[in-house]
C-alpha cells in the first residue's frame, strides 16, 4: 500500500511571513520604554517576527512572555505564551513536549472562555496526536475544534477542520471517509470564494486517489492544483506538494524514472517547518529503489531517516519503515532479518490500530454523526416552526380575507337591495306621475270642453246682444226721425250710443 504525505492546515495564530528587520527594531525600542503590563504584548510581537525563520531567538522572547505575564497576572498572555512555546516545539517535531504546553494553555483558555484560543489550541493538539499516530485522540480534538469553528461560523476555519478530520481517516486507510471530508473542505472553499490553501484540499484528494490506485485522477488533481500558480506565484510548499504528489502517482504507474525525478525535485523544497516531508519523500524514494532492484540504496536511505523518526516519535512513519525493510530483505532472501522487521511492523501496528483505538474512533464518529443529526433535527424543527407560523399567518390572512369578502358580499347585497328598492320606488313614482298626468290631462280636457261650451254660449249670447243692439239702434234711428222733441232726441241718441257700446263687446 502506497504511503503518501498529507498536509495539515493549521491557520495558526503564529503564522508570519518572515522577519521584518525594521519592525523588529521598532519593537525592541518600544520594549525599552514599555510598562510591565505592556511588555508581554511587545515580546509576543517580537516572537512572531522570529518564529518562522529563527526559532531559537523566538523561544527566548516567548519564554519572556510567559514570565512577564505571570508577573502582570495576565491570563490571556499566559495562554498565548504557552501556545507559542508549544508551536515552536511542534515545528521542531517535539510533539510530546508541545502537547504539555498546549494542554497547559488549553486549561487556562477553558477556565477563561477564550473561545478563539480554544479553537487554535485544540486544532494544534490534534496535529500533534496525528503526527504521533494517536488517531483516536487526534479525531477527538479535531471534532472539538470543528464545534468551536462552527460557533464562530468562520467558513475558512471550518474548511481547515474538515481537511484535518479527513487526514485522520486517510491515516486509518478509510479512504471513503477521507474523500468525503476533503471534498467538504474543498466545496466550502470554492462555494465561498476562499482561496487560502485551496490547492492543499485538491492535493489531499489526489493522495486518496493514489491510495485507491486511481493514478490518472490523482495526476489531474495535482495538475489542477499547480495550474493555480499561473495566476499567483507558487510557494515552496506548492512546488513541494506538486512534485511529491506526481512522484507518488508515477511510482504507482510504474514509471520509476519520472517518479525519482519528481521526488528528488520535491526534496529541494523541504524546509525546517516541513521536515516531515523529507522523511516521507525518502521513504517514497526507497520504494523507487526497491522497485528497480537497487536494494542497498533503499536500505541505506531508510536507515538514515530511522533515528529522526524515532526521536520525533513518529509511529506511523516507523511503521512504513518496518514494512519497507521487511519487503526489501525478502527480496534479498534474508528472511531472518525480514522476519524481524515484519514482527516489529506487526507489534507496532497492533499498538497504533488496536481494537480500542478503532472502537474509540468509531464511537467519536458516531457521537459526531449524532450531533450532526441532532443539529439537522433542530434546524428542521426550526424550519417546521417557521412554516407553522407562516401557516398560522396564512390562515389568519385567509380568515381576514374571507371576512372582508363576506362584508363586501353583505354590502353588495345591501346595495343591490337598495337599488331594487330605489328602482321600485322610481317605478311607483313613475306610475303616480303617469296617473297624475292622466288625471291632469282629463281635467284639462274637461276644462277645455267647458271652456269651448262657454265660448259657444258666449258667442251665441254676443250674437243675440249684437242683434238686440242693432234692433235698438234701428228703433232709435226711426224714433229720431219721427220726433222733434229735443229731450226725446237726446234720449234716443243716448239709446243709440248704448247700443253701439253694447255692440263693441
Image (cartoon, rainbow, N blue to C red):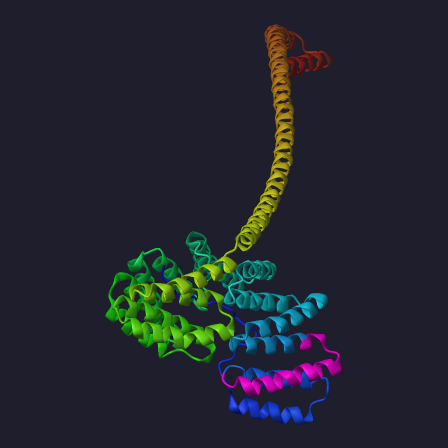
Question: Residue 385 falls in which quadrant of the image?
Answer: top right
Q: Where does the image place residue 75, in percent across and percent down from the top left? A: 71, 75
Please, is residue 164 above or below residue 98 in the view? above
Quadrant where the N terminus lies? bottom left
Between residue 86 and residue 339, name the one nearer to us: 339
Q: Where does the image place residue 293, in percent across and percent down from the top left? A: 25, 68
Q: Where does the image place residue 414, in percent across and percent down from the top left? A: 65, 24
Question: Residue 13 falls in which quadrant of the image?
Answer: bottom right
Quadrant where the C terminus lies? top right
Please, is residue 263 above or below residue 183 in the view? below
Is residue 75 rendered magenta in the image? Answer: yes
Residue furthest out toward the front = 336
Residue occupying the point 56% across, 82% down: 48
Number of numbered labels in the structure image: 0
Q: Where does the image place residue 216, in percent across and percent down from the top left? A: 28, 59
Residue occupying the point 54% across, 55% down: 357
From the viewer's perspective, is 230 left or right of 126? left
Please, is residue 495 above or below residue 364 in the view? above
From the viewer's perspective, is 80 left or right of 133? right
Task: Report whether residue 481 is seen.
Answer: no
Task: Report whether residue 234 is seen.
Answer: yes
Q: Give the residues in magenta.
A: 53-78
Please, is residue 115 above or below residue 425 in the view? below
From the viewer's perspective, is 344 left or right of 438? left
Between residue 256 and residue 222, name the one nearer to us: 256
Between residue 125 and residue 375, name the one nearer to us: 125
Is residue 199 rendered magenta in the image? Answer: no
Q: What main secondary structure does the magenta stretch of the protein show?
A: helix
Question: Residue 384 falls in which quadrant of the image?
Answer: top right
Residue occupying the point 51% across, 73% down: 312
Amino acid at each position: 500500500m502506497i504511503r503518501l504525505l498529507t498536509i495539515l492546515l493549521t491557520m495558526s495564530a503564529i503564522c508570519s511571513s518572515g522577519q521584518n528587520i525594521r519592525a523588529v527594531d521598532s519593537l525592541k525600542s518600544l520594549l525599552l520604554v514599555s510598562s510591565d503590563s505592556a511588555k508581554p504584548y511587545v515580546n509576543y510581537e517580537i516572537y512572531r517576527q522570529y518564529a518562522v525563520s529563527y526559532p531559537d531567538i523566538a523561544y527566548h522572547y516567548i519564554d519572556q512572555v510567559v514570565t512577564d505575564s505571570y508577573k502582570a497576572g495576565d491570563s490571556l498572555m499566559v495562554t498565548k505564551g504557552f501556545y507559542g512555546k508549544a508551536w515552536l516545539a511542534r515545528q521542531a517535531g517535539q510533539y510530546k513536549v508541545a502537547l504539555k504546553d498546549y494542554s497547559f494553555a488549553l486549561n487556562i483558555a477553558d477556565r477563561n472562555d477564550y473561545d478563539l484560543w480554544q479553537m487554535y489550541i485544540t486544532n494544534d493538539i490534534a496535529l500533534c496526536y496525528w503526527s504521533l499516530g494517536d488517531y483516536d485522540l487526534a479525531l477527538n480534538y479535531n471534532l472539538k475544534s470543528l464545534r468551536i469553528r462552527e460557533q464562530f461560523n468562520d467558513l475558512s476555519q471550518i474548511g481547515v477542520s474538515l481537511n484535518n478530520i479527513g487526514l485522520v481517516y486517510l491515516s486509518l486507510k478509510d479512504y471513503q471517509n477521507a474523500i468525503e471530508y476533503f471534498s467538504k473542505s474543498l466545496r466550502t472553499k470554492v462555494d465561498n470564494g476562499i482561496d487560502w490553501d485551496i490547492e492543499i484540499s485538491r492535493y489531499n484528494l489526489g493522495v486518496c486517489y493514489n491510495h485507491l490506485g486511481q493514478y490518472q485522477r490523482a495526476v489531474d488533481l495535482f495538475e489542477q492544483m499547480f495550474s493555480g500558480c499561473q495566476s499567483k506565484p507558487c510557494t515552496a510548499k506548492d512546488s513541494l506538494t506538486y512534485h511529491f504528489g506526481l512522484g507518488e502517482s508515477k511510482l504507482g504507474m510504474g514509471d520509476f524514472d519520472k517518479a525519482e525525478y519528481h521526488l528528488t525535485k520535491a526534496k529541494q523544497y523541504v524546509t525546517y517547518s516541513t521536515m516531515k516531508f523529507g522523511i516521507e519523500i525518502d521513504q517514497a524514494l526507497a520504494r523507487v529503489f526497491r522497485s528497480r532492484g537497487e536494494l542497498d540504496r533503499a536500505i541505506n536511505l531508510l536507515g538514515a531517516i530511522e533515528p529522526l523518526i524515532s526521536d520525533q516519535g513518529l509511529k506511523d512513519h516507523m511503521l512504513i519503515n518496518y514494512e519497507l525493510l521487511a519487503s526489501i530483505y525478502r527480496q534479498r532472501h534474508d528472511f531472518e532479518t525480514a522476519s524481524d522487521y515484519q514482527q516489529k511492523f506487526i507489534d507496532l501496528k497492533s499498538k497504533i490500530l488496536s481494537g480500542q483505538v478503532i472502537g474509540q474512533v468509531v464511537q467519536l464518529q458516531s457521537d459526531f454523526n449524532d450531533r450532526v443529526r441532532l443539529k439537522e433535527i433542530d434546524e428542521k424543527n426550526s424550519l417546521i416552526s417557521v412554516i407553522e407560523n407562516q401557516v398560522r399567518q396564512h390562515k389568519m390572512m385567509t380568515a381576514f380575507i374571507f371576512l372582508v369578502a363576506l362584508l363586501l358580499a353583505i354590502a353588495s347585497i345591501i346595495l343591490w337591495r337598495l337599488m331594487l328598492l330605489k328602482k321600485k320606488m322610481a317605478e311607483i313614482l313613475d306610475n303616480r306621475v303617469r296617473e297624475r298626468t292622466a288625471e291632469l290631462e282629463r281635467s284639462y280636457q274637461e276644462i277645455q270642453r267647458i271652456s269651448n261650451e262657454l265660448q259657444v254660449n258666449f258667442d251665441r249670447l254676443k250674437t243675440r246682444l249684437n242683434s238686440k243692439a242693432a234692433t235698438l239702434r234701428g228703433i232709435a234711428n226711426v224714433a229720431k226721425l219721427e220726433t222733434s222733441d229735443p229731450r226725446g232726441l237726446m234720449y234716443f241718441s243716448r239709446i243709440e250710443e248704448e247700443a253701439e257700446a253694447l255692440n263693441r263687446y
